[in-house]
Image (cartoon, grey):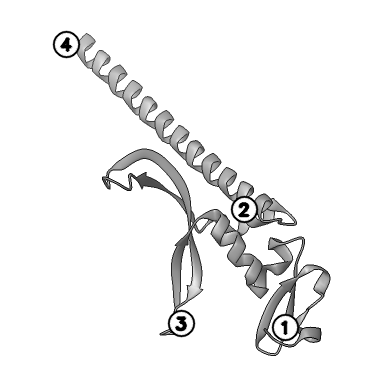
Amino acid sequence: MNDRNSNLEQFEERIAASEQKAQQWERRYKEATISHALEDAARGQGAFNADQVVTLLRGMTKLVETTDKATGKPTGRFEAVVDFPETDPKTGKPVAVQKTPEEAVRRMNLCGAFHYVASNTSWPCFEGAVLCWTPHNFCPTRFAGTP
């Protein structure tokens, strides 16, 4: 009976250790996949420093399983999705809109609060109610009138 209890305890310890390792690798996979997707999006959108973009968006990003468009069934593949903060135009209340990392970084480029992080080629230019993004702070609306 003593051997059986000993074997059972060893078995339970091995299962617990295996579950802990599986959870650890799942966390590593998620973190690496999300960081890679955010870094690629930041570089693709011309960020000054991709690490800053990753830091800003990491807490809003999660992995979601993709579904087959034809069948609606899960594919077993995962992609990063950012719950990007926006304002509902009807209510004026904050909402989270799911965007791809590329869409989120592109949106950051258009948002005056993030222009110092998100783009190395454009600077904000306010001309009346028109917001335009142009290289080197040159705003064509000053010279050509508002579009």
> For the residue carrying disc 2, how many other residues have a C-alpha within 10 Å: few (<14), some (14-19), or many (20+)?
many
Q: Amino acid at mark 2?
A: Val
Number of numbered markers:
4
Q: Quadrant for residue 88, please give it.
A: bottom left
- Point 59% across, 50% down: residue: 38
Q: CA distance from mark 1 to mark 2?
A: 27 Å
Query: Which type of secondary structure does the marked residue at label 1 adopt?
Result: strand
Pointer 4 or 2: first along the chain: 4
Residue 63 image offset from top left, x and y in percent: 44, 48
In the rendered view of the protein, which quadrant contains the N terminus?
Answer: top left
- The residue nearer to you, when weighing 142 against 105, is 142
Query: Which dot marks residue 126?
Result: 1
Residue 78 image offset from top left, x and y in percent: 42, 42
User: Where is mark 4, residue-wise?
Assistant: 1
Q: CA distance from mark 3 to mark 1?
A: 21 Å
Q: Amino acid at mark 4?
A: Met
From the viewer's perspective, tell me whether residue 3 is left or right of residue 46: left
User: Where is mark 3, residue-wise?
Assistant: 89
| Image position of 34 with respect to 19: above or below | below
Mark closer to the observer (4, 3): 3
Q: CA distance from mark 4 to mark 2?
A: 56 Å
Asked whether the beta carbons under mark 4 and mark 2 sit within 8 Å of each other, the answer is no
Q: CA distance from mark 2 to mark 3?
A: 27 Å
Query: Which type of secondary structure does the marked residue at label 2 adopt?
Result: helix
- The residue nearer to you, when weighing 16 against 105, is 105
User: Where is mark 2, residue-wise?
Assistant: 54
